[in-house]
């Protein structure tokens, strides 16, 4: 599995995941919508940890910076 997420993308996803979790656990969002958003937050957090987004692959998206060989 090749990395296809850059640092900015990972940071934004992590912040969104934490924000959704805080809103859910403080009962600002609740019910079915709250559960769906909490699951989405878990997916965001998981994809940012492994630096791979499966939805990017079919579209050929890659937000990682290319590291050029210095040889």
Image (cartoon, rainbow, N blue to C red):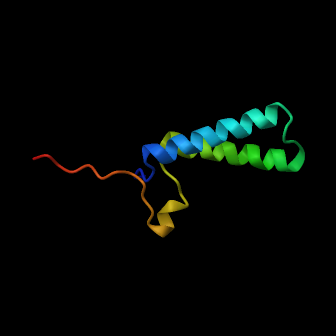
Where is residue 46 drawn, in percent x and y?
58, 42
Q: Nearer the viewer, residue 16 or 54?
A: 16
Residue sitting at 69 percent across and 48 percent down?
40
Residue sitting at 48 percent across and 50 percent down?
52
Q: Is 21 left, or right, of 14 in this rendering?
A: right
Does 7 sit above or below residue 60?
Answer: above
User: Given the current orientation, which residue lies at the most extreme left position?
Assistant: 71
Where is residue 29 drawn, in percent x and y?
84, 42
Where is residue 4 drawn, in percent x and y?
43, 53
User: Given the current orientation, which residue lies at the most extreme bottom position?
Assistant: 59
Which of the 4 image quarters holds residue 19?
A: top right
Q: Is 12 left, or right, of 27 in this rendering?
A: left
Q: Nearer the viewer, residue 55 or 18?
A: 18
Where is residue 22 drawn, in percent x and y?
74, 33
Does 24 sit above or below residue 43?
Answer: above
Residue sitting at 48 percent across and 63 percent down?
57
């Amino acid at each position: 599995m090749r990395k296809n997420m850059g640092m900015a993308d990972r940071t934004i996803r992590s912040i969104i995941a934490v924000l959704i979790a805080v809103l859910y656990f403080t009962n600002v969002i609740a019910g079915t919508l709250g559960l769906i958003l909490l699951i989405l937050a878990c997916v965001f957090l998981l994809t940012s940890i492994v630096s791979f987004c499966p939805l990017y692959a079919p579209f050929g998206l890659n937000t990682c910076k290319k590291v050029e060989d210095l040889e």
